[in-house]
Image (spheres, coloured by chain):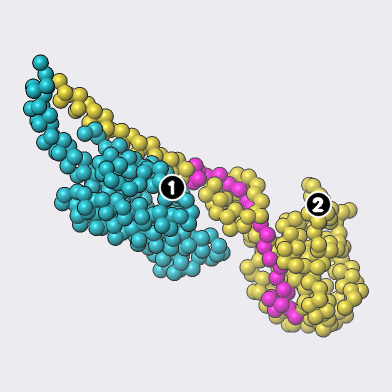
Amino acid sequence: MNLLKSEVWSKVLTMMLWVLVALSVVELVFSAFYVLNYDFFYDRIYPVYGFVETMYVVLYYVVCIVFLIWIYRVHMDLNRMFLQFPRTPGKALACLMIPVYNLYGIPSTFRRIGDSYRSGITGFRSQGQWIYHLALPLLILIYVSNTLNRAIARVDVISDSLMLSTSIVEVVLYTIFLTLTILIAKGLTLARAEVAHHTAEAEPIIEAQQPSVSL
Amino acid sequence: MNEIPVASVERKRKIGSHWIIFAILLLIPLSVAVVGYFPRYYSFTAQGEIVPIREIGVDGSVHFVYVLEGVTNNLYEKFSVRQAYPDASFTRVDSSYDDDIDELREIEAEMRNETIRHAVDSAAKASDESLSDGERDARLARLFEETANYYGDSIGLMLGIGLYEEREHEDFSHGGLYTIAGTGTLEEDDSVGSVGAIPDKLRTAEAQGADIFFVPKDKETFFFYGLSNEEEARQVADEEHLRVRVVPVSTLEEALAFLKQLNS
């Protein structure tokens, strides 16, 4: 079987998510200083805070685009390897991107992948369960994060609790995204190996039959 | 056997490609951050607030106006200020401006104290009641302390009116019927001097529901470059169809005379 359509993008997304998680942790540390020692934050951290914040925000949007490319290609692979897989790449994108509909679309996308993994890939049952069960917390955290960010944009002075809770939610959210990406990519690699194994087992039979039809 | 090198080359190509894509994509936020943080200086002014004169311990009904001013050191800070104050207007300045502004603050603080002295003296003169030296010094000390967070001398006229109200037990707002605000220095001879940031001050007064806005009547005396306070205020009020009534005055007495003829 050919290489996975999503293989390169899985690696790219994983690396970018590692960077995003790292930056979100840095931001959490900055937020902790903002809460615990504002003077120190203003004198020492604020000069670099803007640089990190700018990178963080722009990287987030880049990761969003990479994620959409990746999920599209993942579904191309899923449709090739799981013949009964119930969602096309286009529909998967629609599920993630259409507002309100994505309340159903986001968890269902990951639940279907998790479902297919736990029932379709030998030795990947527990990871499939993880993907399945992380879908709902992911949705909740996306909405909590959006709500907190909107609240930050509205207020003149950001309260300590708002600043800290936003940072914590973002670290957890991006860690879940990273975990899901790693698990889904790993599952696809295993599924490909399984398909390749079955194909290899089937090939000698085809070869054995060939002499009988050739003259 | 021929297939093995082909697969190996393909694999190497794939291994390399994700690093290349990753590096290119990572350059995007990095570049934006570098551009955003590249030193580039802008001074800005933005709408502030009208503040009841009572907030600085004067028993009057009028308001003074402050606007926000500052310097941004790069595009990120400029963006942040614009997010916080969408109406802010920016002017490109050079890097020395940031250092100059500290000196300017000291000068403005001295100018503020000077106009407060004039306001106290002018209000005493206007109310025909003299102040003992002790009373004057105590009053000045309190006012210097209460206004320590404001810079510039544009509080003079409104402070003079507020102090007059206090001494004469007047309420020019007629129980809050009128919201009276304004700007302008008060000089030693009771005349009202020109100030800066008239458009932002006028917009602030309009946004905060002021009915009357005093400005210096300085068309004949304005010696800076550009429009006088009086002309600029009229221009902004006309162009933006402001509801607030712009009242140019040249002395404290003129402002008091206008307020005394206001109907309740």
Left or right relative to A190: residue A96: right
Q: Secondary structure at mark 2?
A: helix
Question: Compared with residue A121, is residue B173 higher up or lower down, i.e. above or below?
Answer: below
**Start-end of magenta stretch:** B34-59
Left or right relative to B34: residue B205: right
Can residue B163 be seen? no
Question: Compared with residue A19, is residue A163 higher up or lower down, i.e. above or below?
Answer: below
Compute the Cα span from label 1 to label 2.
Answer: 48 Å
Pick the residue in front: A46 or A119: A119
| 1 vs 2, front mark | 1
Chain name for mark 1: A
Q: Residue at left 43%, top 54%?
A: A102
Q: Residues within 10 Å of mark 1 (few under 14, many from 20)?
A: some
Question: Compared with residue B212, is residue B95 higher up or lower down, i.e. above or below?
Answer: above
Q: Secondary structure at mark 1?
A: helix
Amino acid on which the number 2 mark rests in the picture: Glu
Q: Are marks 1 and 2 in contact (CB under 8 Å)?
A: no
The chain letter corresponding to cyan is A
Q: Choose top left, top right, bottom left or bottom right for residue A138.
A: bottom left
Pick the residue in front: B109 or A160: A160
Pick the residue in front: B76 or A121: A121
What residue is pinned by disc 2?
B239
Q: Residue at left 19%, top 27%?
A: B7
**Residue B259, percent from left and from top:** 87, 73
What residue is pinned by disc 1?
A94
Q: Residue furthest top?
A: A215
Question: Which quadrant, please, contains the C terminus of chain A?
Answer: top left
Amino acid on which the number 1 mark rests in the picture: Ala
Mark identifier at residue A159: none
The colour assigned to chain B within the rendered structure: yellow
**Residue A206, percent from left and from top:** 12, 29
Question: Which quadrant, please, contains the N terminus of chain A?
Answer: top left
